[in-house]
Amino acid sequence: MRYGIFVCFLCVTFLFSCNNDDNGDIVSVPPRLLSEVVAEDTDEIREFLRTHFYNYEEFASPPPNFDFNIRIDTIAGVNSDKTPLMDFVDSLTVSVSSNEFIGLDDEDDIPHTFYYLEAIEGAGTSPTIGDSTLVKFEGSLLDGTVFDASTVFGWQYLPGTLRGYHNGIAQLNVGDVIIDNPDGTADVGGAGIGLIVMPSGLGYYNTPPSVLIPVYSPLIFKVTTGLFVEDTDFDDDGIPSILEDVDGDGNLANDNTDFDDEVDRRATPLPNHLDADDDGDGVSTRSEISDDDGNIIGPPYPDSNNDGTPDYLDPDTN
């Protein structure tokens, strides 16, 4: 089953949920307040982390033929003496803006905390939220219902995935070498193995892609982190994707320097990390940061009128 953890690159907002009324008319149901939902999610997640454990003993002393998969179970009965997940996880808090959701724009930014576990630390370094990363994953609800999985490594451009997911991956180390297997397949040596638990505001919130995922569901992702492309430049404009986070809030989807111009031209709005002409002046970003020989200048990038805005983000210079 492949419903995908990816969110549409071009969709930085969610659609209304709709229900039929008794007359057969469509009734728009606006999303619930972020502050209300995240409080419920946080309580549910923390209770889950306090009452469940993972197979940490197997990771500490791997038995013969151990498959190095994270398994989660309830602390009860014969497992009543197990150490809860809460004692192993770290956490990170990011802000979620209500204006990212259609029909929900009357709240301040709301802090959302996700939790992550590194069962095995990868031998390499960590990707940024803007990098393409080689990953295997399994996505599930807190009750264990699996809604998506990949049993082989695949490349994921992290800005195109759920916010909780790509922020979580960025906290984990990857592997360090490709291993060619005798059967012609390949694997990654020194890969990391981890777990990410996120509130629904960092997941699918009120528009899940599958009937397997109820609205406002916290999510779990078990991940194996392989390799990553350092300083990924997805739109090939000469600016690494991570540097296209102009406002520095860790969310590449809300950085669109020429949004108003794109709307006026009835063009599809593209965030800077997907736009080869970030300021919409008709001169490509790559041209505005290159010398006559095509070599990239910067960072810092050229600012010909010294107004503090580099030329590639300033439509008044080219």
Image (tube, rainbow, N blue to C red):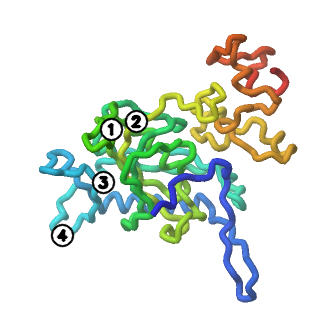
Question: Image point 84% across, 47% down: which residue?
Answer: 266
**Helix, strand or loop at disc 1?**
strand
Looking at numbered disc 3 in the image, what kind of residue is underneath it?
Leu
Circle 1 Cα neighbour tier, 10 Å, few/some/many (<14 / 14–19 / ≥20): some
Q: Which mark is residue 188?
A: 1
Label 1, label 3: how many angstroms apart (C-alpha)? 27 Å
Q: Which residue is mark 2?
A: 227
Looking at numbered disc 1 in the image, what kind of residue is underneath it?
Val
Determine which quarter of the picture holds residue 276: top right
Circle 4 Cα neighbour tier, 10 Å, few/some/many (<14 / 14–19 / ≥20): few
Label 2, label 3: how many angstroms apart (C-alpha)? 26 Å
Question: Image point 51% across, 36% down: which residue?
Answer: 131
Label 4, label 2: how many angstroms apart (C-alpha)? 40 Å
**Helix, strand or loop at disc 4?**
helix
Name the image quarter holding the N terminus: bottom left
Q: Which residue is mark 4?
A: 77
Determine which quarter of the picture holds residue 18: bottom right
- Look at discs 4 and 1 and give the one toward the viewer: 1
Circles 4 and 1: CB distance less than 8 Å? no
In the rendered image, residue 240, in percent from the top left (x then y), is placed at: 58, 28
Q: Residue extending furthest bottom?
A: 22
- Look at discs 2 and 3 and give the one toward the viewer: 2
Q: Which mark is residue 85?
A: 3
Label 1, label 2: how many angstroms apart (C-alpha)? 8 Å
